[in-house]
């Protein structure tokens, strides 16, 4: 990792329009299938922006969601918008973005959760995130609906108070776009 990096951790409300535009542009460069709903999911929580020589080269955010598991609703720090410039992957930039958000999760939420790409699964596992092994669902306007496509990509970061049975069902709250 370069010596001239800066990690800024701030709530969406504390970021100016240029910071948000830079983070959004990075995610659109990193992901071929990035959509406006995906960007919207990244807003309203705490962001970590990693800059190298003034350019945002990595981003992640954590937002609050309600997930149902084991007969109760949990306050979860849900990680969104994790992206690193392709030329810099594997050099610590993703870790620089995730570390402060994992501290936020540990102090403010029952547990953390995220949906991973295939390429990033080993990265999250190396940071202590655990793969969810049970079925997934979403609480939709039509009721609870299974989300089989998410069964193989979800990870959780258990908190000290969370009694999670990772083979049980996990149900997310409703939102537009990708549910997980």
Image (cartoon, rainbow, N blue to C red):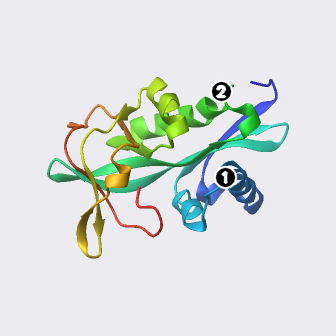
- Residue 44, placed above or below residue 170: below
Which element type, helix, strand or loop, lies under badge 1? Answer: helix
Image quarter where the C terminus lies is: bottom left
Horizontal side, residue 50 vs residue 167: left or right = right
Where's residue 68, x and y in %?
24, 54
Q: Nearer the viewer, residue 3 or 174?
A: 174
Any mark on residue 129, and which? Answer: none
Indicate which disc residue 90 carries.
2
Residue appearing at x 61%, y 59% in the figure: 34
The extreme bottom residue here reads 142
With respect to residue 153, does 126 lie above or below?
A: above
In the image, farthest residue toward the left: 71
Q: Is residue 162 left or right of residue 65?
A: left
**Most foreground residue, 73 or 38:** 38
Which quadrant does the N terminus fall into? top right
Q: Quadrant of residue 21?
A: bottom right
Q: Position of residue 19 (x, y in %)?
A: 73, 54
Indicate whether 36 appears above or below 113. below
> Measuring 76% from the left and 35% from the top, which residue is drawn there?
87
* Distance from Cα at disc 2 to Cα at disc 1: 17 Å
The answer to which quarter of the image holds residue 60 is top right
Crowd band around label 1 with a 10 angstrom C-alpha radius: few (<14), some (14–19), many (20+): many
Q: Which residue is mark 1?
A: 27
| Residue found 72% across the figure and 40% down from its top | 85
Category of crowding for the residue at label 2, using alpha-carbon neighbours closer than 10 angstroms: few (below 14), some (14–19), many (at least 20): few
């Amino acid at each position: 990792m370069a010596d001239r990096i800066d990690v800024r951790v701030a709530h969406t409300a504390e970021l100016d329009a240029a910071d948000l535009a830079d983070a959004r542009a990075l995610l659109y460069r990193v992901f071929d299938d990035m959509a406006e709903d995906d960007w919207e999911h990244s807003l309203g929580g705490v962001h970590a922006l990693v800059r190298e020589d003034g350019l945002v080269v990595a981003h992640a955010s954590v937002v609050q969601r309600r997930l149902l598991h084991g007969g109760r609703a949990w306050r979860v720090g849900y990680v969104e918008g994790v992206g690193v410039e392709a030329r810099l992957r594997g050099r610590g930039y993703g870790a620089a973005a995730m570390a402060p958000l994992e501290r936020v999760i540990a102090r403010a939420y029952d547990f953390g959760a995220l949906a991973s790409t295939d390429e990033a699964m080993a990265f999250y596992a190396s940071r202590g995130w655990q793969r969810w092994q049970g079925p997934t669902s979403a609480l939709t306007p039509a009721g609870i609906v299974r989300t089989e496509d998410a069964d193989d990509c979800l990870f959780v970061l258990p908190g000290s108070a969370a009694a999670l049975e990772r083979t049980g069902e996990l149900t997310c709250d409703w939102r537009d776009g990708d549910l997980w």
